[in-house]
């Protein structure tokens, strides 16, 4: 039937299969396998249909022969037999119901059996008629919470979003592909939320200058990452990637490049605030230029620096363009003409990747890492670091990755040996210790005292209430041997909400006790996030940025943590591990010095 299908359609089918299996009560493993496959397909940069036709879809993680077969069947027949069978058993409308808070597959099945509810609309009707409360085990309170969730639009499928690394990878591939096809003088830049280094991205904005605009716009359709192109002309092109992301290419005259880059880097709120500020000075800012009421002239700008200078502002780094006070901070103290850029502003000098001098969170084969202490130490030295802390999981981590107190003692000895045998980097003995539900740690104090560095993290019992979770984490913060709190909110971007914890209280306790708070740089986490990290630094807490690397190549994720720190307005001074070990060590709690 279908010659080809966009990745999003194949991913939707796998996701529905996973959901239907879950509603049917299948084993968890199968459900998770379909969901993982859906994610892989959705984010793949190339056409999965084409890959499957070539017998090569199995090259992707999580796609085996069986799933490749299912993709081919879907392409040939428009459906998958297992899906048809399940649809006959469980109404697909129940899937949306399982996404509502408090409503898992079990309750969705119950509502279907008892009330015949088979869609969000039917659920709303039943709730409004007061019928949900008649079902055993569900009450009036439950009914009200369902109505509230429906009101807020929970349950609708969200548009696909790419995590930042994927978005930048896609943006870079498109920019390179276009530059190649546009010929000499073509320059393609990434704008939008990807340029602002946001956590995730739903569309990619590209701004180009070229001598052959029509050729460049038409060549978008020829790129391997592109699924379809809706329009292409002299001003640019619009299309969709195989990963389901909208692509917007705009072509600028070189004299206008600064205006377009500024406008399409956004954010919307930053631009709105900028327009308002400009109007007060009799100016109108848009992607076409800066219009002056008094002179009746429009000035175009080749660079963003010129755009901001025309408005009396210093250049604002893209990461700061969120309307969080950056315009006030960028005001130049002596109002300049657009020729003088030298006046001072109150903008921070943002931290950059080369400022980082050590990584204080990584795992080895002793827990769930893939490399040895020595391999991790050498990889850290290759990054130019002066120190690295080995912090495997602790005694109660589970999944077979526990490190017993006895094993930790041996691990400390091994770290000392590696440290003695490798020049050019200091290897520190640490641990990522579990914060148990009661706030205690899972090693004895005398063992913790033998370590150079202790991170405490929550890895279990995520769902406790805010008061209990806050108490639990503050207990760890107050522990005299805890140096830092790892991934303090536990969020997974686009996948798991942060746990309920009173961040101002946690931050305050961290500042008071000298406990550092981590920006975990794993691009799935970026935790602390930008808002929390800025508040923490303002409250006087020390911030440490760590990779949480589980393999040598993962030290590279440090850049995403630095991106979050930049979005949090942090300078090198605000981040502890921009210091030499000697100075870093002094920032730790008194008990360790
Ligand atoms: Zn962890
Ligand atoms: Zn970790």
Image (cartoon, grey):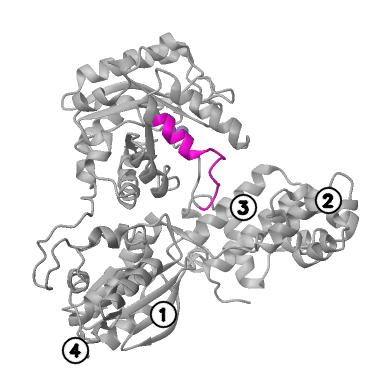
Magenta-tinted stretch: 494-510
Q: Earlier in the sequence, mark 4 or mark 3?
A: 3
Where does the C terminus fall, quadrant-wise? top left
Relative placement, left or right, of 159 versus 247 is right
Q: CA distance from mark 1 to mark 2?
A: 48 Å
Q: Marks 4 and 1: which is nearer the front? A: 4
| Residue situated furthest top in the rendering | 446
Spot occupied by residue 240 in the image (x, y as percentages of width and height): 45, 74
Q: Secondary structure at mark 3?
A: helix
Spot occupied by residue 271 in the image (x, y as percentages of width and height): 35, 71
Seen from the viewer's position, the closer of residues 134 and 183 is: 134
The answer, for residue 462, to whether it is visible in the render is no
Marks 4/2 in contact by CB < 8 Å: the verdict is no
In the image, residue 543 sits, relative to residue 270, either above or below, namely: above
Disc 4 target residue? 295
In the image, residue 546 sits, relative to residue 47, either above or below, namely: above
Spot occupied by residue 250 in the image (x, y as percentages of width and height): 32, 79
Relative placement, left or right, of 525 versus 557 is right
Q: Earlier in the sequence, mark 3 or mark 2?
A: 3
Disc 2 target residue? 140
Q: Marks 3 and 2: which is nearer the front? A: 2
Disc 3 target residue? 34
Seen from the viewer's position, the closer of residues 388 and 145 is: 145
Q: Earlier in the sequence, mark 1 or mark 2?
A: 2
Mark 2 within 8 Å of ligand 1, using the beta carbon: no
């Amino acid at each position: 039937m279908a010659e080809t299908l966009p990745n999003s359609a194949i991913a939707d089918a796998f996701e529905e299969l996973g959901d239907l299996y879950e509603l049917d009560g299948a084993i968890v493993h199968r459900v998770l396998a379909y969901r993982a496959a859906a994610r892989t397909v959705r984010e793949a940069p190339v056409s999965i249909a084409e890959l499957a036709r070539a017998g090569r879809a199995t090259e992707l993680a999580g796609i085996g022969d069986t799933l490749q077969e299912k993709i081919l069947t879907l392409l040939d027949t428009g459906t998958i037999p297992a899906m048809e069978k399940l649809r006959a058993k469980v109404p697909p409308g129940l899937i949306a119901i399982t996404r509502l808070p408090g409503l898992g597959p079990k309750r969705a099945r119950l509502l279907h059996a008892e009330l015949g509810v088979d869609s969000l609309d039917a659920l709303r009707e039943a709730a409004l008629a007061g019928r949900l409360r008649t079902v055993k085990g569900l009450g009036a309170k439950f009914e009200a919470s369902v109505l509230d969730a429906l009101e807020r639009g929970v349950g609708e499928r969200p548009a696909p979003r790419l995590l930042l690394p994927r978005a930048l990878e896609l943006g870079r591939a498109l920019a390179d592909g276009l530059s190649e096809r546009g010929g000499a003088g073509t320059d393609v830049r990434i704008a939008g939320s990807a340029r602002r280094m946001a956590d995730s991205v739903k569309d990619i904005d590209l701004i180009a200058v070229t001598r052959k605009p029509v050729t460049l716009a038409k060549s978008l359709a020829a790129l391997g990452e592109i699924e379809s192109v809706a329009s292409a002309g002299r001003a640019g092109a619009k299309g969709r990637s195989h990963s389901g992301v909208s692509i917007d290419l705009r072509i600028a005259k070189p004299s206008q490049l600064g205006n377009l880059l500024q406008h399409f880097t956004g954010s919307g709120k930053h631009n709105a605030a900028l327009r308002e500020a400009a109007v007060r000075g009799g100016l109108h800012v848009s992607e076409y230029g800066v219009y002056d009421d008094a002179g009746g002239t429009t000035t175009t700008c080749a660079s963003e620096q010129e755009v901001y200078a025309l408005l009396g502002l210093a250049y604002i780094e893209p990461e700061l363009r969120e309307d969080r006070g950056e315009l006030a901070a960028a005001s130049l103290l002596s109002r300049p003409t657009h020729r003088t850029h030298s006046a001072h502003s109150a903008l921070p000098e943002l931290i950059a990747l080369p400022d980082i001098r050590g990584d204080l969170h990584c795992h080895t084969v002793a827990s769930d890492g893939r490399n040895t202490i020595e391999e991790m130490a050498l990889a850290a030295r290759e990054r130019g670091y002066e120190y690295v802390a080995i912090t495997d999981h602790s005694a109660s981590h589970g999944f077979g990755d526990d490190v017993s107190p006895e094993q930790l003692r041996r691990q400390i000895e091994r770290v000392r040996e590696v440290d003695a045998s490798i020049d050019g980097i200091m290897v520190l003995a640490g641990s990522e210790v579990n914060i148990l539900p009661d706030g205690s740690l899972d090693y004895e104090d005398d063992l913790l005292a033998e370590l150079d560095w202790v991170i405490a993290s929550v890895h279990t019992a995520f769902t406790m209430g805010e008061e209990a979770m806050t108490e639990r984490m503050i207990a760890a913060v107050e522990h005299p041997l805890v140096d830092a709190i790892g991934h303090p909110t536990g969020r997974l971007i686009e996948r798991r909400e942060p746990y309920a914890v009173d961040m101002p209280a946690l931050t305050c306790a961290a500042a008071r006790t000298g406990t550092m708070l981590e920006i975990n740089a794993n691009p799935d986490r970026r935790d602390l996030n930008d808002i929390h990290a800025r508040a923490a630094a303002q409250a006087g807490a020390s911030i440490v940025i760590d990779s949480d690397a589980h393999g040598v190549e993962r030290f590279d994720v440090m850049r995403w943590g630095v991106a979050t720190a930049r979005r949090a307005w942090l300078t090198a001074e605000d981040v502890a591990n921009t210091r030499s070990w000697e100075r870093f060590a002094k920032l730790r709690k008194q008990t360790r010095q």
